[in-house]
Image (cartoon, rainbow, N blue to C red):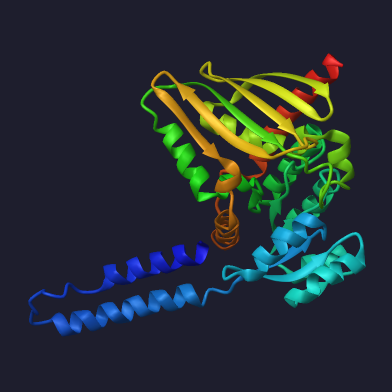
Amino acid sequence: MAEHTEHTEQTEQTERTKPAEHTKPTEHSEQTEQTERTEYSERTDQTTQRAPVAVGLVGAGPWATRVHAPVFAAGPETRLTAVWARRPEAARALAEPYGAVACVEYDELLDRCEAVVFAVAPEAQPALAERAARAGKAVLLEKPIAADPDTARRLAEVIGAAGVGSMVALSARYAPRVREFLAHAENAETPWRGGRLSCVSGAFLDGPFAASPWRQTRGAILDIGPHAFDLMSVALGDVVDVRADSPGAGWTALQLVHAGGAVSQVVLCGTATGGHRYDVELYGSTGALALDLTEAIDAAAFAVLRAEFAALVRDGGEHVCDVRRGLYLQEVIARAERQLAAAR
Protein backbone atom coordinates (compact mmCIF):
# COMPACT_ATOMS: atom_id res chain seq x y z
CA MET A 1 0.00 0.00 0.00
CA ALA A 2 2.81 2.41 0.85
CA GLU A 3 4.60 1.69 -2.44
CA HIS A 4 1.40 2.34 -4.39
CA THR A 5 0.88 5.64 -2.57
CA GLU A 6 4.46 6.78 -3.20
CA HIS A 7 4.13 5.84 -6.89
CA THR A 8 0.85 7.71 -7.21
CA GLU A 9 2.20 10.85 -5.56
CA GLN A 10 5.31 10.77 -7.73
CA THR A 11 3.22 10.28 -10.88
CA GLU A 12 0.93 13.18 -9.94
CA GLN A 13 3.93 15.42 -9.25
CA THR A 14 5.44 14.50 -12.62
CA GLU A 15 2.17 15.27 -14.40
CA ARG A 16 1.98 18.66 -12.69
CA THR A 17 5.47 19.59 -13.91
CA LYS A 18 4.79 18.68 -17.55
CA PRO A 19 3.98 21.56 -19.94
CA ALA A 20 0.47 21.53 -21.36
CA GLU A 21 0.46 19.44 -24.53
CA HIS A 22 -1.50 21.95 -26.65
CA THR A 23 0.10 25.18 -25.41
CA LYS A 24 1.25 27.37 -28.27
CA PRO A 25 5.05 27.82 -28.13
CA THR A 26 6.28 31.29 -27.27
CA GLU A 27 9.54 32.95 -28.32
CA HIS A 28 11.34 31.81 -25.16
CA SER A 29 9.45 28.56 -24.54
CA GLU A 30 12.40 26.26 -25.31
CA GLN A 31 14.76 28.16 -23.00
CA THR A 32 12.09 28.37 -20.29
CA GLU A 33 11.38 24.65 -20.48
CA GLN A 34 15.10 23.87 -20.24
CA THR A 35 15.42 26.09 -17.16
CA GLU A 36 12.40 24.44 -15.52
CA ARG A 37 13.80 20.97 -16.29
CA THR A 38 17.15 21.91 -14.75
CA GLU A 39 15.55 23.36 -11.61
CA TYR A 40 13.26 20.33 -11.24
CA SER A 41 16.22 17.99 -11.69
CA GLU A 42 18.19 19.81 -8.99
CA ARG A 43 15.25 19.62 -6.58
CA THR A 44 14.81 15.92 -7.34
CA ASP A 45 18.52 15.24 -6.82
CA GLN A 46 18.45 17.00 -3.46
CA THR A 47 15.48 14.87 -2.38
CA THR A 48 16.74 11.52 -3.64
CA GLN A 49 20.31 12.10 -2.42
CA ARG A 50 19.24 13.01 1.10
CA ALA A 51 21.06 10.49 3.27
CA PRO A 52 18.79 8.12 5.17
CA VAL A 53 18.72 8.65 8.92
CA ALA A 54 20.96 6.21 10.79
CA VAL A 55 18.72 4.56 13.37
CA GLY A 56 19.75 2.59 16.44
CA LEU A 57 17.22 0.12 17.83
CA VAL A 58 17.04 -0.60 21.55
CA GLY A 59 15.35 -3.90 22.34
CA ALA A 60 15.08 -7.27 20.64
CA GLY A 61 11.69 -8.51 21.78
CA PRO A 62 8.57 -9.24 19.73
CA TRP A 63 7.74 -5.65 18.80
CA ALA A 64 11.34 -4.86 17.83
CA THR A 65 11.53 -8.04 15.77
CA ARG A 66 8.14 -7.82 14.07
CA VAL A 67 7.84 -4.07 13.52
CA HIS A 68 10.71 -1.72 14.32
CA ALA A 69 13.61 -3.65 12.77
CA PRO A 70 11.97 -4.40 9.39
CA VAL A 71 10.27 -0.99 9.18
CA PHE A 72 13.37 1.13 9.84
CA ALA A 73 15.65 -1.16 7.83
CA ALA A 74 13.36 -0.91 4.80
CA GLY A 75 13.78 2.83 4.33
CA PRO A 76 14.14 4.77 2.15
CA GLU A 77 14.08 7.52 4.78
CA THR A 78 16.02 5.48 7.34
CA ARG A 79 18.55 2.68 7.67
CA LEU A 80 19.04 0.37 10.64
CA THR A 81 22.67 0.71 11.73
CA ALA A 82 22.83 -0.75 15.24
CA VAL A 83 20.91 -2.88 17.74
CA TRP A 84 21.41 -3.09 21.49
CA ALA A 85 19.51 -5.29 23.90
CA ARG A 86 19.91 -6.57 27.42
CA ARG A 87 20.69 -10.01 25.97
CA PRO A 88 23.60 -9.72 23.49
CA GLU A 89 22.64 -12.94 21.70
CA ALA A 90 19.16 -11.54 20.98
CA ALA A 91 20.68 -8.32 19.63
CA ARG A 92 22.94 -10.33 17.30
CA ALA A 93 20.08 -12.45 16.02
CA LEU A 94 18.02 -9.37 15.23
CA ALA A 95 20.81 -7.25 13.76
CA GLU A 96 22.43 -9.74 11.39
CA PRO A 97 19.63 -10.13 8.79
CA TYR A 98 19.65 -6.36 8.26
CA GLY A 99 23.40 -5.86 8.18
CA ALA A 100 23.27 -3.85 11.39
CA VAL A 101 25.85 -3.95 14.17
CA ALA A 102 24.93 -5.72 17.39
CA CYS A 103 26.35 -3.49 20.09
CA VAL A 104 27.62 -4.90 23.35
CA GLU A 105 27.46 -1.53 25.10
CA TYR A 106 24.63 0.98 24.88
CA ASP A 107 27.08 3.86 24.38
CA GLU A 108 28.37 2.10 21.27
CA LEU A 109 24.87 2.21 19.80
CA LEU A 110 24.63 5.94 20.55
CA ASP A 111 27.93 6.48 18.72
CA ARG A 112 26.66 4.65 15.64
CA CYS A 113 23.31 6.40 15.08
CA GLU A 114 21.57 9.74 14.68
CA ALA A 115 18.31 8.69 16.29
CA VAL A 116 17.17 5.97 18.66
CA VAL A 117 14.06 3.80 18.43
CA PHE A 118 12.93 2.07 21.63
CA ALA A 119 11.10 -1.23 22.02
CA VAL A 120 11.61 -1.98 25.71
CA ALA A 121 9.54 -2.27 28.87
CA PRO A 122 8.12 0.93 30.45
CA GLU A 123 10.36 0.71 33.50
CA ALA A 124 13.51 0.34 31.36
CA GLN A 125 12.83 3.02 28.76
CA PRO A 126 13.18 6.36 30.64
CA ALA A 127 16.80 6.05 31.79
CA LEU A 128 17.94 4.84 28.37
CA ALA A 129 15.96 7.53 26.55
CA GLU A 130 17.37 10.24 28.82
CA ARG A 131 20.91 9.14 27.92
CA ALA A 132 20.04 9.22 24.24
CA ALA A 133 18.54 12.71 24.50
CA ARG A 134 21.57 14.03 26.38
CA ALA A 135 23.73 12.59 23.60
CA GLY A 136 21.76 14.69 21.10
CA LYS A 137 19.74 11.87 19.57
CA ALA A 138 16.10 12.18 18.55
CA VAL A 139 14.00 9.45 20.16
CA LEU A 140 11.03 7.33 19.13
CA LEU A 141 9.50 6.16 22.40
CA GLU A 142 7.42 3.09 23.04
CA LYS A 143 4.10 3.57 24.79
CA PRO A 144 3.63 3.99 27.67
CA ILE A 145 6.71 6.20 27.92
CA ALA A 146 7.34 5.16 31.56
CA ALA A 147 5.90 3.12 34.39
CA ASP A 148 4.57 6.12 36.32
CA PRO A 149 3.83 9.85 35.83
CA ASP A 150 6.76 11.16 37.89
CA THR A 151 9.28 9.25 35.79
CA ALA A 152 7.47 10.25 32.61
CA ARG A 153 7.58 13.88 33.69
CA ARG A 154 11.31 13.72 34.30
CA LEU A 155 11.83 12.14 30.88
CA ALA A 156 9.84 14.92 29.22
CA GLU A 157 11.92 17.53 31.05
CA VAL A 158 15.22 15.93 30.00
CA ILE A 159 14.15 15.66 26.36
CA GLY A 160 12.92 19.25 26.41
CA ALA A 161 16.16 20.52 27.93
CA ALA A 162 18.22 18.58 25.39
CA GLY A 163 16.28 20.13 22.51
CA VAL A 164 15.97 16.87 20.57
CA GLY A 165 12.94 15.66 18.68
CA SER A 166 10.64 13.03 20.14
CA MET A 167 7.75 10.89 18.98
CA VAL A 168 5.68 8.18 20.66
CA ALA A 169 4.78 5.01 18.73
CA LEU A 170 1.01 5.41 19.02
CA SER A 171 0.51 3.26 15.93
CA ALA A 172 -3.09 4.26 15.25
CA ARG A 173 -2.20 7.94 14.94
CA TYR A 174 0.00 7.26 11.92
CA ALA A 175 -2.57 5.18 10.04
CA PRO A 176 -4.04 7.15 7.09
CA ARG A 177 -7.56 5.80 7.67
CA VAL A 178 -7.45 6.74 11.35
CA ARG A 179 -6.32 10.23 10.43
CA GLU A 180 -9.23 10.52 8.04
CA PHE A 181 -11.57 9.34 10.79
CA LEU A 182 -10.23 11.93 13.26
CA ALA A 183 -10.35 14.70 10.66
CA HIS A 184 -13.98 13.83 9.93
CA ALA A 185 -14.70 13.86 13.66
CA GLU A 186 -13.06 17.26 14.07
CA ASN A 187 -15.00 18.76 11.16
CA ALA A 188 -18.43 17.50 12.23
CA GLU A 189 -21.15 20.15 12.04
CA THR A 190 -22.53 19.31 15.49
CA PRO A 191 -20.68 18.29 18.66
CA TRP A 192 -20.25 14.63 19.48
CA ARG A 193 -22.16 13.55 22.56
CA GLY A 194 -20.17 10.41 23.27
CA GLY A 195 -18.13 7.52 22.01
CA ARG A 196 -17.11 3.95 22.54
CA LEU A 197 -13.84 2.10 22.04
CA SER A 198 -13.33 -1.63 22.51
CA CYS A 199 -10.04 -3.48 22.42
CA VAL A 200 -10.63 -7.08 23.41
CA SER A 201 -8.26 -9.94 22.57
CA GLY A 202 -6.41 -12.91 23.98
CA ALA A 203 -2.97 -11.43 23.37
CA PHE A 204 -1.88 -11.92 26.98
CA LEU A 205 -2.88 -15.59 26.98
CA ASP A 206 -0.94 -16.83 23.99
CA GLY A 207 1.53 -15.50 21.47
CA PRO A 208 4.63 -13.28 21.63
CA PHE A 209 3.29 -10.89 24.28
CA ALA A 210 1.99 -13.50 26.70
CA ALA A 211 5.36 -13.73 28.48
CA SER A 212 5.70 -9.98 28.99
CA PRO A 213 6.02 -9.42 32.79
CA TRP A 214 4.77 -5.84 32.81
CA ARG A 215 1.72 -6.71 30.70
CA GLN A 216 0.88 -9.59 33.02
CA THR A 217 1.34 -7.39 36.11
CA ARG A 218 -0.29 -4.13 35.02
CA GLY A 219 -2.69 -5.50 32.42
CA ALA A 220 -4.35 -4.01 29.37
CA ILE A 221 -4.75 -0.55 30.87
CA LEU A 222 -0.99 0.09 30.67
CA ASP A 223 -0.54 -1.61 27.30
CA ILE A 224 -3.68 -0.76 25.34
CA GLY A 225 -4.77 2.22 27.44
CA PRO A 226 -2.41 4.75 25.81
CA HIS A 227 -3.91 4.02 22.37
CA ALA A 228 -7.49 4.17 23.65
CA PHE A 229 -7.09 7.34 25.71
CA ASP A 230 -5.21 9.03 22.89
CA LEU A 231 -7.87 8.36 20.26
CA MET A 232 -10.82 9.25 22.47
CA SER A 233 -9.26 12.49 23.71
CA VAL A 234 -8.40 13.58 20.17
CA ALA A 235 -11.91 12.81 18.95
CA LEU A 236 -13.91 14.13 21.91
CA GLY A 237 -11.62 16.48 23.86
CA ASP A 238 -9.25 16.25 26.81
CA VAL A 239 -10.14 13.76 29.52
CA VAL A 240 -11.24 15.66 32.63
CA ASP A 241 -12.55 12.74 34.70
CA VAL A 242 -12.11 8.98 34.77
CA ARG A 243 -14.21 6.20 36.25
CA ALA A 244 -12.76 2.70 36.13
CA ASP A 245 -13.83 -0.72 37.31
CA SER A 246 -12.76 -4.31 36.78
CA PRO A 247 -14.67 -7.49 37.59
CA GLY A 248 -11.47 -9.48 37.27
CA ALA A 249 -10.12 -11.83 34.59
CA GLY A 250 -8.27 -8.93 32.96
CA TRP A 251 -11.44 -7.06 31.97
CA THR A 252 -11.39 -3.29 32.51
CA ALA A 253 -14.31 -0.93 31.86
CA LEU A 254 -13.79 2.83 31.92
CA GLN A 255 -15.95 5.90 31.55
CA LEU A 256 -14.21 9.06 30.38
CA VAL A 257 -15.64 12.55 30.75
CA HIS A 258 -14.26 14.94 28.17
CA ALA A 259 -13.86 18.69 28.09
CA GLY A 260 -17.05 20.04 26.51
CA GLY A 261 -19.24 17.42 28.15
CA ALA A 262 -18.96 14.35 25.92
CA VAL A 263 -18.80 10.99 27.68
CA SER A 264 -17.15 7.85 26.30
CA GLN A 265 -16.91 4.22 27.32
CA VAL A 266 -13.72 2.21 26.88
CA VAL A 267 -13.42 -1.56 27.30
CA LEU A 268 -9.96 -3.13 27.47
CA CYS A 269 -9.03 -6.78 27.82
CA GLY A 270 -6.03 -8.85 26.79
CA THR A 271 -7.20 -12.14 28.27
CA ALA A 272 -10.40 -12.81 26.34
CA THR A 273 -11.02 -16.06 24.49
CA GLY A 274 -13.09 -16.62 21.41
CA GLY A 275 -12.34 -13.61 19.27
CA HIS A 276 -10.78 -10.21 18.77
CA ARG A 277 -12.36 -6.79 18.57
CA TYR A 278 -10.73 -3.38 18.16
CA ASP A 279 -13.04 -0.62 17.00
CA VAL A 280 -14.24 2.88 17.80
CA GLU A 281 -17.53 4.76 17.39
CA LEU A 282 -18.61 8.35 17.95
CA TYR A 283 -22.22 9.39 18.49
CA GLY A 284 -23.90 12.75 17.92
CA SER A 285 -27.36 14.21 17.49
CA THR A 286 -27.15 13.84 13.71
CA GLY A 287 -25.49 10.47 13.34
CA ALA A 288 -22.56 8.23 14.17
CA LEU A 289 -19.03 7.64 12.93
CA ALA A 290 -17.32 4.25 13.21
CA LEU A 291 -14.00 2.65 12.30
CA ASP A 292 -12.63 -0.89 12.54
CA LEU A 293 -9.16 -0.21 13.94
CA THR A 294 -7.94 -3.75 13.28
CA GLU A 295 -8.30 -3.16 9.55
CA ALA A 296 -7.28 0.50 9.62
CA ILE A 297 -3.89 0.03 11.28
CA ASP A 298 -1.84 -1.62 8.55
CA ALA A 299 1.62 -1.40 6.99
CA ALA A 300 0.89 2.11 5.75
CA ALA A 301 0.78 3.35 9.35
CA PHE A 302 4.37 2.31 9.99
CA ALA A 303 5.57 3.75 6.69
CA VAL A 304 4.09 7.10 7.78
CA LEU A 305 5.68 6.76 11.22
CA ARG A 306 9.09 6.11 9.65
CA ALA A 307 8.81 9.03 7.24
CA GLU A 308 7.67 11.47 9.92
CA PHE A 309 10.36 10.38 12.36
CA ALA A 310 13.04 10.84 9.69
CA ALA A 311 11.66 14.29 8.86
CA LEU A 312 11.74 15.20 12.56
CA VAL A 313 15.40 14.18 12.76
CA ARG A 314 16.40 16.03 9.60
CA ASP A 315 14.21 19.13 9.81
CA GLY A 316 13.63 19.56 13.54
CA GLY A 317 10.42 21.00 14.88
CA GLU A 318 7.78 19.25 16.97
CA HIS A 319 5.39 16.37 16.46
CA VAL A 320 1.84 16.16 17.78
CA CYS A 321 2.66 12.72 19.26
CA ASP A 322 5.77 13.84 21.14
CA VAL A 323 6.95 13.04 24.67
CA ARG A 324 4.51 15.60 26.11
CA ARG A 325 1.65 13.66 24.58
CA GLY A 326 3.09 10.57 26.18
CA LEU A 327 3.17 12.32 29.55
CA TYR A 328 -0.47 13.38 29.19
CA LEU A 329 -1.49 9.78 28.49
CA GLN A 330 0.60 8.54 31.41
CA GLU A 331 -1.35 10.84 33.73
CA VAL A 332 -4.68 9.53 32.43
CA ILE A 333 -3.47 5.96 32.97
CA ALA A 334 -2.48 6.80 36.55
CA ARG A 335 -5.92 8.25 37.26
CA ALA A 336 -7.56 5.11 35.92
CA GLU A 337 -5.29 2.83 37.94
CA ARG A 338 -6.06 4.77 41.12
CA GLN A 339 -9.76 4.25 40.43
CA LEU A 340 -9.21 0.52 39.98
CA ALA A 341 -7.19 0.29 43.18
CA ALA A 342 -9.90 2.10 45.15
CA ALA A 343 -12.58 -0.22 43.77
CA ARG A 344 -10.85 -3.38 44.93
Work out whether 129 lies above or below 35.
Answer: above
**Observer-nearest of 231 and 331:** 231
Residue lying at 7% horizontally and 76% vertically, measured from the top left: 24
Q: Is residue 30 left or right of residue 10?
A: left
Quadrant housing the C terminus: top right
Q: Is residue 157 left or right of residue 285?
A: right
> Visible in this render: residue 135?
no
Q: Quadrant of residue 233?
A: top right
Please state the horizontal and vertical placement of residue 151, each as a whole percent of the image: 81, 38
Q: What is the count of numbered marks?
A: 0
> Visible in this render: residue 256?
yes
**Observer-nearest of 339 and 199:** 199
Q: Is residue 182 left or right of residue 244?
A: left
Work out whether 291 lies above or below 314.
Answer: above
Work out whether 240 lies above or below 2.
Answer: above
Residue lying at 8% horizontally and 82% vertically, measured from the top left: 27
Please state the horizontal and vertical placement of residue 98, each as a whole percent of the image: 73, 74
Q: Quadrant of residue 215?
A: top right
**Observer-nearest of 20 and 283:** 283
Residue lying at 63% horizontally and 53% vertically, measured from the top left: 165
Please state the horizontal and vertical placement of residue 147, each as a whole percent of the image: 82, 38
Please state the horizontal and vertical placement of residue 65, each as a whole percent of the image: 77, 62
Residue lying at 63% horizontally and 70% vertically, measured from the top left: 74
Work out whether 313 lies above or below 267.
Answer: below
Q: Is residue 118 left or right of residue 106?
A: left
